Image: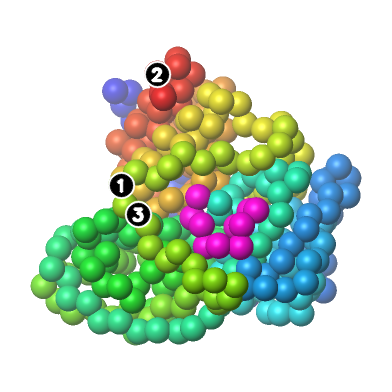
Amino acid sequence: MPLGLRSKKKDKSKETSKLVESEAAAPVPPAAAAAPAPASASRLQFHTQLAHGSPTGRVGGFSSARELYAKIAEAFDIDPAEIMFCTLNTYKADMDKLLGAQIGLEDFIFAHIKGQRKEVEVLKTDDVLGLTITDNGTGCAFIKRIKEGSLMDQTKIICVGDHIETINGKNVSDCRHYEVAKMLKDLEKGQMFKLELIEPMKAFEKLEPRSKGGSLPEAKISRGRETLRLRTKGPATVEEMPTEVEEKAIKKVDELLETYMGIRDIELAATMVEAGRDKKNPDEFAVALDETLGDFAFPDEFVFDVWGAIGDAKQGRLE
């Protein structure tokens, strides 16, 4: 194992809370000016609807999830902060169809907006709650999976798709998913804790709210031969669909994110795989991660496991 992995990473100049505060700025008003996307991307138009029911609108000219939500909000005359997450090609809160880093050029975007609020008190009887957290790319953390048989699986009011608004009275609406996951993990065993949640607005038919447990079914990251790649930093680009090797690596890295950090994030996984594409060793990979994703304090063993997963994918050792 190479030495000095930690020493090669940049020192953080700000506390995590300050970084998150910066990332979680107020939603961009629809009229706000944004950096123009590349010509090939700015001409693209996507069909969209509100998941609980609405006329069909068209959106385009966006380079990030934040800009996309602003465009959708403008189309339907709502506040961008009301959008919890988007799914592709289904109005259901299907966690295998979440909008991630890639949007197929033929994909239909459904926006799920905030609905009913609810509160629940839970006695933490186990070290592991059984929740996997993700977010919408603008700071809205929500539940992606509930492990079958877990403590949270027994608390029926808590559902997949719920936004976690407060933990023991502390508002976490502007916190990233990895922070929310850590707060939940750090809750003291044997103590009661209180969650305030917001569920997606429902219509059409009763949404399927709970996971079926076990491993998540394999899902394609996008449809079609070309996709629009959204980026947290920089303009969106039209790219070829990820190769089979890249898809396998991204899927494995997403699983490692859940194991180490209690989160799922296809966009983050894809960014990490991209960062390791031309690196020769884990030290170079660690430096690239820190330059690209300095907000995250990844443990060294996680970096090595991700590097190993990328190598396994290249060698055809991943199913």
Q: Are marks 3 and 1 in contact (CB under 8 Å)?
A: yes
Whole-number angstrom distance, CA of label 3 to CA of label 1: 7 Å
Query: Sequence order check: which comes first, mark 3 or mark 2?
Result: 3
Residue 315 lies, with reference to residue 149, above or below; the image says above
Q: Is residue 94 magenta?
A: yes
Q: Which mark is residue 212?
A: 3
Q: Nearer the viewer, residue 5 or 39?
A: 39
Q: Quadrant of residue 187?
A: bottom left
Residue 51 lies, with reference to residue 229, above or below; the image says below
What kind of residue is marked 1? Gly
User: Where's the N terminus, which quadrant?
Assistant: top left
The image position of residue 94, as x and y in percent, is 51, 57
> Which scheme is used to colour this image of the protein?
rainbow
Q: Residues within 10 Å of mark 3 (few under 14, many from 20)?
A: few
Q: Are marks 3 and 2 in contact (CB under 8 Å)?
A: no
Q: Residues within 10 Å of mark 2 (few under 14, many from 20)?
A: few
Q: Nearer the viewer, residue 1 or 108?
A: 108
Q: SS for tag 2?
A: loop
Q: Which mark is residue 214?
A: 1
What kind of residue is marked 2? Arg
Q: Say which residue label 2 marks.
A: 317
Whole-number angstrom distance, CA of label 2 to CA of label 1: 22 Å
The image position of residue 132, as x and y in percent, is 36, 57
What stretch of residues is rendered in magenta? Answer: 86-96
Query: Sequence order check: which comes first, mark 2 or mark 1?
Result: 1
